[in-house]
Image: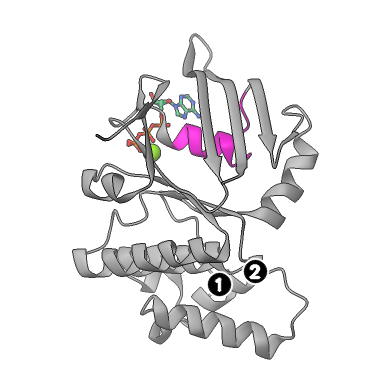
Amino acid sequence: MSTLIEGIDLEKSFRTRYVETRVLNRVCIRIGTSEIIALTGRSGSGKTTLLNAIGLLAPPDHGHYKLNGEEVDLSNIASHHRVRREQFGFVFQEFMLVDYMTARENVRLVTRSKSGRIAINAKIERLAEELEIEHRLDHYPPQLSGGQRQRVAILRAVMNSPKCIFADEPTGNLDSTTGARVLRLLRGLKSKGCAIVIATHDQEIAASCQRQYQLTDGTCEEITFN
Ligand SMILES: Nc1ncnc2c1ncn2[C@@H]1O[C@H](COP(=O)(O)OP(=O)(O)OP(=O)(O)O)[C@@H](O)[C@H]1O
Ligand SMILES: [Mg+2]
């Protein structure tokens, strides 16, 4: 399996007026093409920070980052936008949907496709059916339940067929049946060459991933199962 993303000695600190907190401390992580990886660790250990760092949303302050074997300049923020748009999909812990746009419009907003409107709509509806959200596509996020909003966020993330999806607690608001369905959809992307990084508190989900990294106060260690 070839390596899609490699992070070496990644560091990230947050500065408030009086204190500087180092949240990622020389983190090394590797994500293979179409690999499913779990990020675990206690609340506040740095999972979301690491997802945002390797997703180049809030890049690390220091370290090396390679994508498909090529070094990405972590200080060149402008170049990250294109990488994210063309190769990554995100499912945020807080969903980040636009409240004054319908679910369908939220998805369409990020859709990058040369296909016409009819083909795009057909894809949205096909994926919505898989996520059992097709009957809510014309609702606005405040009219949706937490779990429905989460599924719209997942639909938005998978729409552009990304090379890697960063999913922050993607089943956190779902009942076990719906959660299993969402995981099945995410896992199905693997056969299309998509890697998935899932931050989760759920040990069962973590154990079902191919590999697991555990964060403890900003340090990261791969857990091996025997
Ligand atoms: N913008 C910020 N400014 C200052 N500190 C921050 C900022 N973002 C995160 N932190 C701190 O970094 C640490 C890690 O936060 P992070 O959100 O990555 O944790 P997490 O593992 O995702 O937690 P959870 O399981 O609760 O989602 C926390 O101590 C948090 O307070
Ligand atoms: Mg988090």
- Please say if 176 is above or below 85: below
Query: What element does badge 1 sit on?
Result: loop
Asked if disc 2 and disc 1 are in contact, CB closer than 8 Å, the reply is yes
- Image position of 201 with respect to 176: above or below: above
Residue 91 versus residue 131 in the image, above or below: above
**Is 149 situated above or below 212?**
below
Q: Position of residue 194 (x, y in %)?
A: 55, 58
- Provide residue 4's location: percent of width, then percent of height: 62, 44
Residue 49 part of the magenta segment? yes
Residue 207, image x, y percentages: 27, 45
The residue to which callout 1 is attached is 101
Left-right relation of 93 to 11: left
Q: Residue at x 42, y 20 (%)?
A: 218
Residue at image coords 66%, 87%: 119
Q: Is residue 98 visible?
A: no
Name the image quarter holding residue 113. bottom right
Is residue 62 shown left or right of residue 37?
A: right
- Ligand 1 positioned in quadrant: top left
The amino acid type found where label 1 is placed reads Met
Query: What residue does disc 2 label?
Result: 109
- Mark with earlier residue (2, 1): 1
Q: Secondary structure at mark 2?
A: helix
Q: CA distance from mark 2 to mark 1?
A: 9 Å
Q: Is 183 colored magenta in this rendering?
A: no
In this picture, which residue range is highlighted in magenta?
A: 48-60
Q: Nearer the viewer, mark 2 or mark 1?
A: 2
